[in-house]
């Protein structure tokens, strides 16, 4: 079927999701294709995680359609999504800190040799090779994963999903808790995954993380889409302005200023500037 072949890996059309009488998502469209990064941006409570949980098979959508390669799906569990090649890396990674990196890499999918013994050698080598392929040279795959930086741990989780055959990679705020340098490592990794032909869905608060790596941008606000653009259609400044955070921080600075608290206002302005949230 040529139609299905050309269809994007993931396509949501008019998707809605309610929790009781809380409307978490309303009429949202999203596409993710092989070799592309689709960014989902929005402030706290915008509906980013709800959207990702629908994609990941954790929640069922209440309205609209969800298609994988042009075929309608209604996943009952993350396992169903994984079987279709859609892997999700959550922010609070499910790792065992005291276990070696290679054990975490193969957690739940251990290789076994004859007599059911663990094939430790192959698992070590594979972990080292897969990390190196993504540009991270681990000195020792036997070190406990807890000794890696947050960014490196995210990278292990991504490399793992790629190794086990993911076609689409969904990342829920992988850079949120990271410093500038570590965030850079993860962003580089996102680009690597795209270059390996994966469809990447990257959720973030930060337009400055999204813009350099993204091909498409969906901006959510209170469960609704307030913009869905390809990179050609939008500048970094426009993307930043669409995010509620910028205008709200500016407003707060003005309010504090008016209230005579100029030191606090200056602080907020400085913060907004350092986040690149103000126009100068
Ligand atoms: N399990 C739930 N039960 C009830 N309401 C929920 C549930 N999960 C999310 N919500 C509500 O749905 C809305 C969207 O939440 P969601 O977690 O998707 O936002 P988010 O964009 O991921 O926010 P954050 O940036 O804080 O992670 C919020 O109003 C939230 O309170
Ligand atoms: Mg969230």
Image: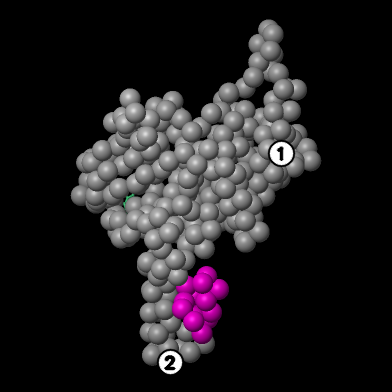
Label annotation for residue 48: none
Magenta part of the protein: which range?
A: 266-280
Mark 1: secondary structure: helix
Compared to residue 51, the image places residue 234 above or below, namely: below
The residue located at (41%, 43%) in the rendering is 32
Compared to residue 211, the image places residue 110 above or below, namely: above
Q: How many marks?
A: 2
Compared to residue 151, the image places residue 78 above or below, namely: above
Q: Locate the N terminus and report the quarter of the image it occupies.
A: top left
N-terminal-most mark, 2 or 1: 1
The residue located at (56%, 34%) in the rendering is 162
Provide the major secondary structure of the magenta segment.
helix
Can residue 169 be seen in the rendering of this structure?
A: no
- Residue 64: % across, % down: 23, 41
Please name whichever residue, 71 or 175, is drawn nearer the observer in this view of the structure.
71
Residue 84 magenta = no
* Furthest residue toward front: 2
- Residue 12: % across, % down: 31, 42
The residue located at (56%, 28%) in the rendering is 164
Residue hosting label 2:
260
Label annotation for residue 132: 1
Horizontal placement of 50 versus 176: left or right?
Answer: left
Can residue 247 be seen in the rendering of this structure?
A: yes
């Amino acid at each position: 079927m040529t139609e299905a072949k050309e269809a994007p890996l993931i396509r949501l059309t008019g998707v809605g999701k309610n929790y009781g009488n809380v409307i978490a998502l309303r009429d949202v469209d999203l596409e993710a294709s092989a070799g592309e990064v689709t960014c989902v941006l929005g402030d706290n409570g915008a509906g980013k995680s709800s959207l990702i949980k629908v994609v990941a098979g954790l929640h069922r959508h209440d309205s609209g359609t969800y298609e994988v390669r042009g075929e309608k799906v209604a996943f009952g569990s993350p396992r169903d999504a994984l079987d279709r090649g859609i892997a999700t890396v959550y922010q609070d990674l499910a790792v065992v800190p005291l276990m070696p990196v290679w054990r975490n890499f193969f957690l739940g999918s251990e290789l076994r040799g004859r007599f059911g013994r663990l094939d430790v050698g192959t698992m070590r080598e594979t972990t080292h090779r897969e990390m190196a392929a993504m540009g991270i040279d681990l000195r020792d795959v036997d070190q406990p994963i807890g000794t890696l930086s947050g960014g490196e741990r995210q990278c292990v989780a991504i490399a793992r999903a790629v190794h086990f055959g993911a076609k689409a990679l969904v990342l829920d705020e992988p850079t949120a808790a990271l410093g500038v340098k570590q965030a850079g490592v993860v962003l580089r990794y996102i680009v690597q995954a795209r270059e390996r032909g994966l469809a990447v869905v990257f959720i973030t608060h930060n337009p400055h993380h999204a813009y350099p790596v993204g091909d498409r941008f969906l901006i959510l606000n209170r469960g609704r889409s307030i913009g869905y653009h390809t990179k050609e259609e939008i500048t970094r400044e426009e993307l930043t302005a669409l995010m509620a955070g910028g205008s709200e921080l500016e407003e707060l600075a003005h309010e504090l200023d008016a209230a005579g608290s100029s030191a606090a206002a200056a602080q907020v302005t400085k913060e907004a500037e350092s986040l690149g949230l103000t126009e100068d």
